Image (cartoon, rainbow, N blue to C red):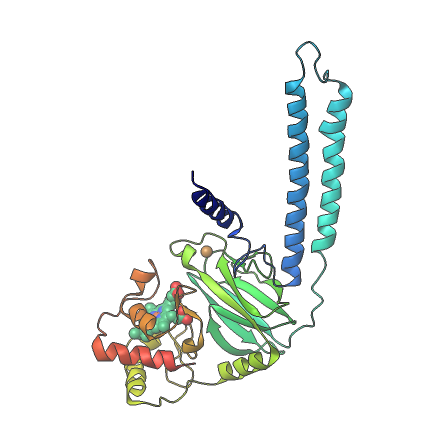
């Protein structure tokens, strides 16, 4: 093998080895206190397990390599009781006590003046921001925004089957159970976009049920909150006006709301600010008019088993106008 190929192999091996260690959806790249505790716990367990594995392998090698007439160890009771019983009991108990002590610590970030309710739906996330009095401020989908350095209580439940809410970069996973609300405290220590994924098999499009958590500075977060609370903007061009009229005249309002218009459907995501979301279809595709148009024509082709019907009736200019209007809803 030439040295060049060798270097390439080494690089490929390294990428395969550490490729999962960073990025927007990695528990090994913590972005907040809760995720850091989990990472510390994971690495410590890994280190202890590795040390024990090495010790056991060394003992086994020692025994195997000893001359046949002089066995390395006669199997004495002391070894069985010491290494086989006492050692695991002491070590596992110590690790248990330690792990309970570090994961119990709450995040010390000051609480945000709002809560977020997230309802798992097959196969997307209904996100509602609640004011201090518990009343809904606005509804969005598949995207949570948080101010950096604040802890936010996220109330998790489901509209149908069990789902599990997991943003590995920020916290451990928590199940969403029918008839129950589980509260998870989320806090990001640094600004960034974290990706989450449903972690409990929930049927058909489970693997395509992702979401984004965007942690941002107070200024841009406040701007986002104010924009979300506002109703849809009045169309500014003939094309977007035509798009809005098509939306209202078709079947879309049966399932979708666009605040400030007569569309108040509640089966699918609230589309009031769909153009400002990073993705459509629960993390499936980036939001722009091309993907919006493809989605409208045949969502089931992009996301099998999706609970939105295809609208092949829209073509050409109609489709472009509809997609342009949705894209403009920032
Ligand atoms: Cu799922």
Given residues 203 and 33, the one toward you in this image is 33
Q: Relative to 319, does residue 169 appear above or below in the rendering?
A: above
Instruction: Give the position of the C terminus as an image quadrant.
Output: bottom left
Q: Position of residue 14 (x, y in %)?
A: 51, 48
**Relative height, residue 183 to residue 8 (above, below):** below
**Relative image position of residue 299 (x, y in whole percent):** 31, 65
- Based on the displayed image, in which of its 4 quarters is residue 257 positioned? bottom left
Name the residue located 65 percent from the left edge and 24 percent from the top edge.
Answer: 60
Residue 243 appears left or right of 78: left
Quarter of the figure with residue 135: bottom right
* Residue 93 falls in image quadrant: top right
Q: Residue at x 56, y 80 (%)?
A: 220
Instruction: Work out whether residue 45 or residue 158 is closer to the camera in this orientation and state it.
Output: 45
x and y, in percent, of residue 232 in the image: 42, 85
Q: Is residue 105 visible?
A: yes
Position of the N terminus, as image quadrant, is: top left
Q: Please name the residue shown 38% across and 54% down the image.
A: 204
Residue 283 x %, y %: 43, 64
Residue farthest top in this picture: 69
């Amino acid at each position: 093998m030439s040295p060049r190929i060798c270097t390439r192999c080494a690089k490929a091996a390294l990428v395969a080895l550490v490729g999962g260690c960073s990025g927007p959806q990695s528990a090994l790249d913590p972005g907040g206190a809760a995720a850091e505790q989990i990472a510390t716990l994971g690495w410590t367990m890994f280190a202890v397990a590795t040390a024990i594995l090495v010790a056991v392998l060394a003992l086994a090698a020692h025994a195997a390599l000893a001359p046949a007439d002089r066995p390395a160890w006669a199997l004495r009771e002391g070894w069985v009781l010491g290494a086989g019983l006492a050692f695991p009991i002491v070590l596992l108990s110590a690790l248990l006590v330690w792990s309970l002590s570090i994961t119990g610590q709450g995040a010390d970030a000051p609480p945000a003046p709002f809560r977020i309710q997230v309802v798992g739906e097959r196969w997307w996330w209904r996100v509602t921001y609640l004011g201090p009095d518990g009343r809904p401020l606005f509804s969005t989908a598949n995207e949570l925004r948080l101010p950096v350095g604040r802890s936010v209580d996220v109330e998790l439940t489901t509209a149908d089957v069990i789902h599990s809410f997991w943003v590995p970069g920020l916290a451990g996973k928590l199940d969403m159970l029918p008839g129950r609300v589980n509260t998870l405290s989320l806090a990001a220590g640094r600004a960034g976009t974290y990706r989450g994924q449903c972690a409990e098999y929930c049927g058909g499009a489970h693997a395509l049920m992702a979401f984004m958590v965007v942690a941002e500075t107070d200024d841009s977060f406040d701007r986002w909150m104010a924009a979300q609370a506002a109703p849809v903007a009045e169309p500014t061009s003939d094309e977007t006006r035509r798009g809005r009229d098509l939306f209202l005249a078709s079947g879309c309002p049966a399932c979708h709301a666009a605040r400030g218009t007569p569309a108040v459907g509640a089966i699918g995501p609230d589309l009031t600010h769909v153009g400002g979301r990073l993705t459509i279809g629960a993390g499936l595709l980036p939001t722009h008019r091309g993907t919006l148009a493809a989605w409208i024509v045949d969502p089931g082709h992009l996301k099998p088993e999706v609970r939105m019907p295809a609208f092949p009736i829209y073509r050409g200019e109609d489709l472009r106008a509809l997609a342009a209007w949705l894209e403009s809803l920032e």
